[in-house]
Image: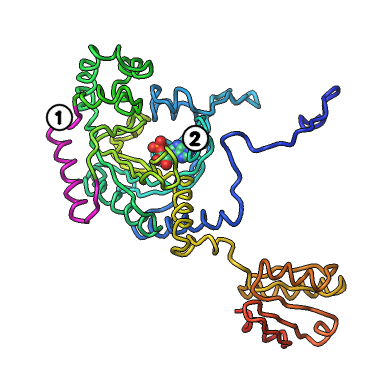
Amino acid sequence: MSTFEKQPGQQKQSSSLKAVRGTRDLLPPETALWNHVESVARDVFARYGFGEIRTPIFEDTQLFARGVGEETDIVSKEMYTWEDRARAQSEKAQSLTLRPENTAGVVRAYIEHKLGERGDLQKLFYIGPQFRRERPQRGRYRQFWQIGCEVLGPVSSGAESPVRDAEVLEMLATLLDELGVRGWQLALNSVGSAEDRKRYNAALREALEPVKARMCEDNQRRAETNPLRVLDSKVPADQEIIDALPKIADFLDADSAAHFAAVRAALDACGVAYTVNPRLVRGLDYYTRTTFEFTVPDGSGLGTQNALLGGGRYDGLSEMLGGPKAPGIGFAIGEDRLILVLQEQAQANKSGAPGLDPETWGQKLDAYIAPMGVERNAAALALARELRRAGLSVEVGDGTFRLKKSFEAADKVARHIVVLGEDEVASNTATVKTFATGAQVKIAQTELQALLR
Ligand code: AMP
């Protein structure tokens, strides 16, 4: 018996099933905006030489434990993890996890397919759902979408160069501008090399020792386990203490400091504005050197979640996952948030670039074919096939509809109605009304395409 069949004694369920908390359905016409955003992103990424990568939605749990870090919020409390039972003697049970982010998966694929042996820089992008068991709120979901890029390769490919960081940031500025996002701000920091961070962590721990008792419980724990995370804290009462803590900039060695200066100089040369935020350390353990975040101002439609995207450099990640040295930099845009911002901005000024005008999300079809009587249904479908194959967008009505109902249905979805009655079918003609002008003509079916375009 399948698990979907009713079990003996099972109560009849009266409540209807709903999408799981923190997940949602995306419906037309809104999906037109999602497609618009993705197509602009694909277009921009192509111009910067990126190719698409698609990795599995679930991976071995170890990938995230090692890659993202056991101490992070994501790994310690937000992952969807399950024990995947063995189905055959030859298989072993395995702990699997729905991906909470995509960088670890991309680096795993880079290692698995030996992409480093190709010698050149790998520029990869992805678009797909990610999963985190967070507290759902506006702009924060348990299944959400990210559009991301990763640039990585062997040291000889120049993957470590600050030019790569600046190029990625400049590309993001271009993408947001082309999408029409207004008022975005770029915050930048360097968290140094692994060694710099070790020294900084020690200094933070020392500085927190005498003051941590006055901090919230979460920060007291972080002060012990992962002092860097204290800098992420938004708890108002702790801000004064946090602002007085040592700054990472004072712990960068000469190479890290020069790298950061070169990133900033290249951004200045491109005219990309940014502010340096010494507290920007970001929530994932793998970051080294450059970290960044793009935010939008309050009132942009994101509520308290004002981070549109984040990213940074991860020079040691490949080695952490058992791969060769492969420095890299990447980012992930929260696509759900990007859509919310675009919707809010489009509503605010009632217009915008293609795809941003709410009026155009549900673009009207070229024609609605209305067969008069069920005997005309087959001819209507044949005519629709011909027009669709010629590149026109067409909806077909139903012969059981009265003329008035056909006109109402057509006016909602299409720019023209094409009426096929007994006479029209017999003479290979059609009666066409253009809704915008009210003009009505009877023409040969061979002339239809020209009229409908
Ligand atoms: P992260 O992978 O944590 O660096 O996040 C990168 C971006 O993904 C963030 O700036 C957000 O825009 C987006 N994001 C992260 N978590 C969520 C979530 N639970 N719901 C929606 N967007 C998210």
- The answer, for residue 44, to whether it is visible in the render is yes
The magenta segment: 247-274
State the SS at label 2: loop
Ligand 1 under 8 Å from disc 2 Cβ: no
- Residue 23, quarter of the rendered image: top right
Q: How is the image coloured?
A: rainbow
For the residue carrying disc 1, how many other residues have a C-alpha within 10 Å: few (<14), some (14-19), or many (20+)?
Answer: few
Residue 277 in picture, x, y percent from top left = 24, 37
Q: Can you say whether 96 is above or below 29 in the image?
A: above
Q: Residue at x 23, y 11 (%)?
A: 210
Q: Residue at x 23, y 20 (%)?
A: 204
Disc assigned to residue 250: 1
Whether residue 26 sits left or right of residue 339 in the image: it is right
- The answer, for residue 112, to whether it is visible in the render is no
Find ligand 1 in the image and state its quadrant: top left
Q: Amino acid at mark 1?
A: Asp
Query: Which residue is disc 2 drawn over?
Result: 99
Q: Residue at x 30, y 49 (%)?
A: 168
Disc assigned to residue 128: none
- Residue 315, quarter of the rendered image: top left
| Magenta stretch prevailing secondary structure | helix
Q: Can you say whether 449 is above or below 247 in the image?
A: below
Q: How many marks?
A: 2
Residue 292 in picture, x, y percent from top left = 30, 41
- Residue 175, quarter of the rendered image: bottom left
Viewer-proximal residue among 160 and 118: 160
Q: CA distance from mark 2 to mark 1?
A: 35 Å
State the SS at label 1: helix
Residue 371 in picture, x, y percent from top left = 80, 74
Viewer-proximal residue among 238 and 294: 238
Quarter of the image that includes the N terminus: top right
Q: Amino acid at mark 2?
A: Arg
